[in-house]
Structure formats: structure tokens, C-alpha cells
Amino acid sequence: MSLTPLLNTATQWVTGRTARFDLRNRWFGVGRTVLASAQLSVLLFTPLKALLVPVLGMGHYPRCDGVRAASAVCVGGGSVGDEVRRWVMVAILLLVVSGYRPRWTALPHAWVAYSVAVSISVPDGGESIGMIVSFLLVPIALADDRTWHWTRPETEQNPSFRIVAYVCFLALRAQIAYLYLDSAISKFGVADWANGTAEYYFLRDNMFGVGQPWSALALGVSKYAIIVVALTWGALLIEIAIGVCVLLKGPWRKAGMALDILLHGSIVLTMGLWSFAFVMIGSSVLCATPGRGRPREAVPRSTGTAGGTGTDALGDAETPGTVDAPTAAPGAVPAPAGT
């Protein structure tokens, strides 16, 4: 049996799915900036020595064995001071946050994300997620020839770049969906989550419990069983909804982003976890990014009137040539994430 017809069919399917696919829009810029801002906050407001404190049973940090030797915290050995390393990483992240030259900053961004994730002694989980997302963004950003990731593209994208970006975009959405679904489903195996009392104990935790100015209100209302159960099971339902939404078409992904901001925003207000929150919010904005765009000179900007609409490669119904900006500015709503 000849494989040629099958390969031709597969090639035509991939080509058709990616013919109009293009992530070079402001959604991508906002998500990437929010993600890098979360990583920047860790390094900007915390001395490197505080991130590398020895951990009982784990030895001294940084650990520079094996692949960890490629970390920015290890390269150069003792000849490079900790503060020099920290400010180099801060400078790289500031460039990413600014949106300048995504193609040039993609690899340095991934390197910094990797360095933080594998080197610090007390990561909170957001560093590992940020590293994975940063790695998945590398092929997408390498295909982005814009000077600023806030602007519309002025060139058609190479078909090969489109295919690689499309695959990475699907992988990103699958990864975030897995994180939320696994987080929610696994909690049903924990007694406090299953019986609906987990939030009661979280709010009173000595390390991560609710702080000012919300402590009196939160501790007061959490004395009522129905409210505690609603908060506990509501968080699980929201996590499941986010995990499902990021796998669906454009409007559903935007709904998932809104739920993500609600979830992590409420956690930030009560428990903190700012950097983790922004990593998850930035990731949800990236997942909600419309997959369709056209170069500036190819199609004029939309004036907001009704016009030819279509469905993009991922099922997003949009006006050709338009790149709509997020309806909510993710950076304005710090969302705590997860737990």
C-alpha cells in the first residue's frame, strides 16, 4: 500500500489549518509581557542570595551539576558576582517586558526562565511553569519578525514558521489544560478538598493564610459551612472550566482567561502568590490569543463596521486583518494562582 496519498492528505490538512494562522498580534504581546513581568518580579525585588539559601537535606545552592551548569547562576563560576548575574537577568527580562524584538529576545528569555527554575532553592511552582511556557514560546517568537510585539506585522509569515508556531500553540494550550485539570482532579483525592473544608484551613494557614486588609472579613465568613464549601468546590469547578476552555475555540478560550483572572485575582487578594499568579494569567492570555492576522499592508485596519468575517485556523471568528486586543488588561488584575 502506497503511503503517498496518505502523506498528501496530511500535508493538505496541515497546510489548510495553518494557511491564515498568525500569532503576531497584541494578545501575544500582552501575554508574553505579563509572563516576563512575573519572572522579573522575583529577581527585581529579591536579592539572589535570598533565593539561594541552603535547604536542609538538599545542600547548598546554586547546584551547578549536569545541565544546571548552563544556568545564568552558574556560568562563569566564582569569577562573576551574584548581583552582576541578577542584573543581567533583570535586563533581559526588561527587554522582554518592553516587547522589543521578540525574535532576538526569545532564547535569552528562555535561558533566564530556565536559570531561575533550576537554580533557586525555594521555588513556588510558578518558576517551573514559566520555564515550560517560555520554552514553548521560543519557536513562536523566532518566527516573529516585528520590532515590537505590540505592533501589527508588516510581512507575510513563512509557511514553515506558521506550521511550527501552530504546533507549539497547540502544545501550550494542552500543557495549561493539563495543569488545571490535573490540579483539580487530584484534589478530589484529598479529604479536605473532597469534603469542602480546604479553604477554611488555607485561610488560617500560618504561612499562606489570608492577610490584611481582608483577614477579618475572610475569617468571619469562613465560619459558615455553606460559604466554605462554595469557596472550596467553586475553586475546583473553575479550575476544571479553565482546563476545558483553553482546548476549545476562541470565545471559549477568552472565557477561560476571564476565569483564570478571577481565580488568581482572588487568591492574590487573600493569600498573595503574586509571581505565580502573573505566570498563570500570562499563560492564559497566550492561550486565548487569536490565531489569525494579516500584514499591515495586506488588509487595512478594521473600522469596527460589519465586514467579511471568517473562521481562522483554530476556529476563531474574526474580521480579516484585525487583531483584537484583550478585553481585559491582564496586568491590571493580579491573579493568584493556584493551588
Image: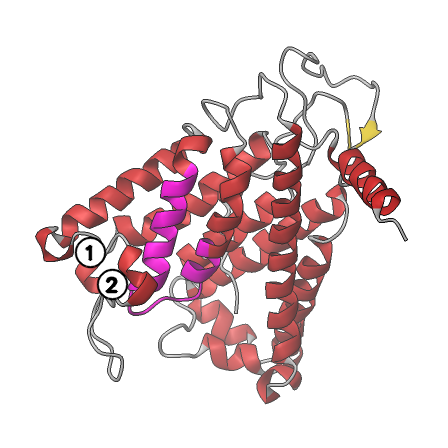
Q: Are marks 2 and 1 in contact (CB under 8 Å)?
A: yes
Q: What stretch is highlighted in magenta?
A: 106-131
Question: Which residue sits at x=58%, y=44%?
Answer: 286
Magenta stretch, main secondary structure, is: helix
- Examine the image and state in which quarter residue 224 appears: bottom right
**Residue 321: image x %, image y %?**
70, 20
- Residue 316 appears in view: no
Residue at the outermost bottom position: 191
What numbered label is drawn on residue 149?
Answer: none
What numbered label is drawn on residue 47?
Answer: 1
What residue type is disc 2 on? Leu
**Residue 205: image x %, image y %?**
41, 79
- Examine the image and state in which quarter residue 156 appears: top right
What residue type is disc 1 on? Pro
Q: Is residue 250 left or right of residue 129?
A: right
Label 2 belongs to which residue?
51
